[in-house]
């Protein structure tokens, strides 16, 4: 399964991911119109400052997923093949059990249903946040690819320290 | 391997599903006295309010047993567990043998022992059958009394209110929800419920149920009479420990389990509301009768049956409640009677009229919180509570309401030995 990962060193804190996410999950899917919609579209990902840098956090599609175990409506499930954690809004009753247990604050109470990253299921090109990121701070990868990148980054950091 | 599971609800089905996921060959038998599709007990209020049907409140598909090749013995009562023979005894006299047993028998409504409690129109509020009987009885009923102001009682009250009944709640304690909140939050809820048209009497205990064959009201211990054509009892739940009485399986308020969901007898596990399990904030075992705990204990029991060495995560009391649009999330030691040595409580009200937050610190640890109104990011705080994290550097931010993941990230990173889950590593790795 591919997940969206984040490299803080490349993040400018521009909020493009957040904005694109909100628009993608709006009624119209168009920036100019989305802002005027009655139910203001909410981003599934948020950018926040941490110690002079930035952190953008969305659903980690955990395994096992606390929100899936907490969902008493059977709305939150983990796809056996893709590993994605998906909320079925037809089943969701808005009890916020998932909000209570999400360690990342990435599952949020909406007006009626839970709001969370759906990996842009309707979008052929994949998660819009990755595409919107101008610096490549957000990237899609499998767990193995991520581990490799992490190793490479660690090595680069070490090399930097030496010079 | 032949595994028998007693109970077909949250804990039992979580165990069954996990077993099948790990082993396609094992033989799984689920025995339950409830002959029902996999409905969610927590959603029965929606059947009473009339908002949903049984089909809407299934938390697993009807084909769950078939899909997972489970031998479902529904409508069968287990009378006793016989650990020496490695069998369970059914009310029919039949015995079912097991190699591993998972007791997930849950709890039963406690009914007060008062005259008239057996009258027609008095109901517990736990099962699909309860909800269906209440929904049927509701027609032609105008007034209702709910006994108990806990989570279940108040959910019943709101459901009846939504169905257009005139509802009175009789609460024994000085405030509603006293097990999970203190006065500031309770008051917000009492005002909110009153605004919905629900009448609340606190410090009010029933002495008897009035009426002939059918209930016509209740009389309180102080002699006050409250008219009601329907009574719902929400006076707590008792763990179904009678199944293991007289065996070596140890039980107090619930069947005692360790962090592997094991009981005191080899090859016998227990999970869910029937248990008394480790509470990492309290530092002792506790009966936290909660859906997420039931699911986790069921999964952990199953994983250990299958020879994996899995343990329960950090855990404590927690609740999420939405009543007539008003939200509450609590975690840790937040009850009105929970007075901790050296604890410091900080309450913050606003900005909205119903917004209210209370934080309980003990030394440098956050040991509980209650959020009314805005509940965003409650899980971030919850992880700090159950992992017993030193939050000295973040106390001010927490109290100021800044506890989103990024705001708490420095604390989490500085305590990374407590945040071992791979998902945290993903964030640490590139920060
Ligand atoms: C109205 C309501 C609202 C709730 N809301 C919430 C909520 O918001 N959040 C939350 O965390 N929790 C909530 N709960 C609690 C939650 O439902 C329980 O924690 C959960 O159901 C526990 O699951 P369990 O499988 O351990 O036990 P149970 O659900 O009690 O299931 C036990 C099963 O075992 C069967 N059984 C028992 N004895 C025997 C026997 N002798 N022989 C055969 N079978 C037997 C029973 O019939 C039952 O099917 C709510 C409960 C109610 C009633």
Image (tube, rainbow, N blue to C red):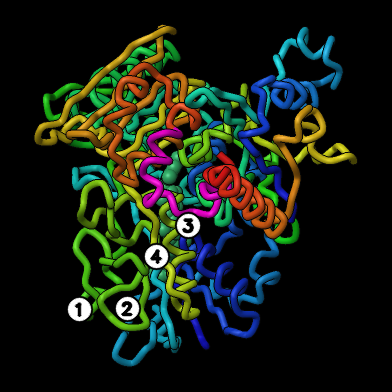
Measuring from the top left, give residue A8's x and y in whole percent.
61, 34
* Location of residue A17 (image quadrant): top right
Residue at horizontal 33 percent and vertical 61 percent from the top:
B274
Mark 1–mark 2 CB contact (< 8 Å): yes
Q: Quadrant of the C terminus of chain A?
A: top right
Discs 2/4, front: 4
Instruction: Tell me the number on the disc at residue B311.
Output: 4
**Residue indicated by mark 2:** B80
Q: Are there few (<14), some (14-19), or many (20+) residues within 10 Å of tag 4? A: some
Say if labels 1 and 4 share a chain: yes
Q: Are there few (<14), some (14-19), or many (20+) residues within 10 Å of tag 3? A: many
- Looking at the rendered structure, the number of numbered marks drawn on it comes to 4
Say if labels 2 and 4 share a chain: yes
**Residue indicated by mark 1:** B246
Residue furthest right as drawn: A124
Secondary structure mostly seen in the magenta stretch: helix
Q: Is residue A84 above or below residue B275?
A: above
Q: Quadrant of ligand 1?
A: bottom left
Which of the marked residues, 1 or 4, is nearer the chain's N terminus? 1
Measuring from the top left, give residue A43's x and y in whole percent.
68, 25
Which of the marked residues, 2 or 4, is nearer the chain's N terminus? 2
């Amino acid at each position: 399964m591919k997940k969206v990962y984040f490299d803080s060193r490349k993040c400018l804190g521009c909020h493009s991911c957040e904005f694109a996410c909100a628009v993608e999950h709006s009624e119209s899917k168009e920036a100019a119109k989305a802002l005027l919609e009655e139910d203001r579209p909410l981003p599934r990902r948020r950018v926040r400052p941490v110690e002079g840098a930035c952190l953008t956090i969305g659903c980690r599609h955990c395994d096992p997923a606390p929100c899936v175990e907490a969902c008493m409506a059977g709305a939150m499930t983990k796809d056996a093949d893709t590993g994605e954690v998906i909320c079925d809004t037809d089943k969701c009753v808005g009890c916020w059990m998932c909000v209570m247990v999400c360690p990342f604050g990435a599952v949020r109470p909406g007006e009626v249903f839970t709001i969370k990253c759906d990996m842009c299921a309707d979008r052929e090109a994949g998660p819009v946040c990755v595409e919107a990121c101008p610096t490549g701070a957000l990237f899609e990868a499998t767990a193995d690819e991520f581990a490799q990148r992490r190793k490479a980054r660690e090595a680069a950091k070490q090399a930097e320290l030496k010079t | 391997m032949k595994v028998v599971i007693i109970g077909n609800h949250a804990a039992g089905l979580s165990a069954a599903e996990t077993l099948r996921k790990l082993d396609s060959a094992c033989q799984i038998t689920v025995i339950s006295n409830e002959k029902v599709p996999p409905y969610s007990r927590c959603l029965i209020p929606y059947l009473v309010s009339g908002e949903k049907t049984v089909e809407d409140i299934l938390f697993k598909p009807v084909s769950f047993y078939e899909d997972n090749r489970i031998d479902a013995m529904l409508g069968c009562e287990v009378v006793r567990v016989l650990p020496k023979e490695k069998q369970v005894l059914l009310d029919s006299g039949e015995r079912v043998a097991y190699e591993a047993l998972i007791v997930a028998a849950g709890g039963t409504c406690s009914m007060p022992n008062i005259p008239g409690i057996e009258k027609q129109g008095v109901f517990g509020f736990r099962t699909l059958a309860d909800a269906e009987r209440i929904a049927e009885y509701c027609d032609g009923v105008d007034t209702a009394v709910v006994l108990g102001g806990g989570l279940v009682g108040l959910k019943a009250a709101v459901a009846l209110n939504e169905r257009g009944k005139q509802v009175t709640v009789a609460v024994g304690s000085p405030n509603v929800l006293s097990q999970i909140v203190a006065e500031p939050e309770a008051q917000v809820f009492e005002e909110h419920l009153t605004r919905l048209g629900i009448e609340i009497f606190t410090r009010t205990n029933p002495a008897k149920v009035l009426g002939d064959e059918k209930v016509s009201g209740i009389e309180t211990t102080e002699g006050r009479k409250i008219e009601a054509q329907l009574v719902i009892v929400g006076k707590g739940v008792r763990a179904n420990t009678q199944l293991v009485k007289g065996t070596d399986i140890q039980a107090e308020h619930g069947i005692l389990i360790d962090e592997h969901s094991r009981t005191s007898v080899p090859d016998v596990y227990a999970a869910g509301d029937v248990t008394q399990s480790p509470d990492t904030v309290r530092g002792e075992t506790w009966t936290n009768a909660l859906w997420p705990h039931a699911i986790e204990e069921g999964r952990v029991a199953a994983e250990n049956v299958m020879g994996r060495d899995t343990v329960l995560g950090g855990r404590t009391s927690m609740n999420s409640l939405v009543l007539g649009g008003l939200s509450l999330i609590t975690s840790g030691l937040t009850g009105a009677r929970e007075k901790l040595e050296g604890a410091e409580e900080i309450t913050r009200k606003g900005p909205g009229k119903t917004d209210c937050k209370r934080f309980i610190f003990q030394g440098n640890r956050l040991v509980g919180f209650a959020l009314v109104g805005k509940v965003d990011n409650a899980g971030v705080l919850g992880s700090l509570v159950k992992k017993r994290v030193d939050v000295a550097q973040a106390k001010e931010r927490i109290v100021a309401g800044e506890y989103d993941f990024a705001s708490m990230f420095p604390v989490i990173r500085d305590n990374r030995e407590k945040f071992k889950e791979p998902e945290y590593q993903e964030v640490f790795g590139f920060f």
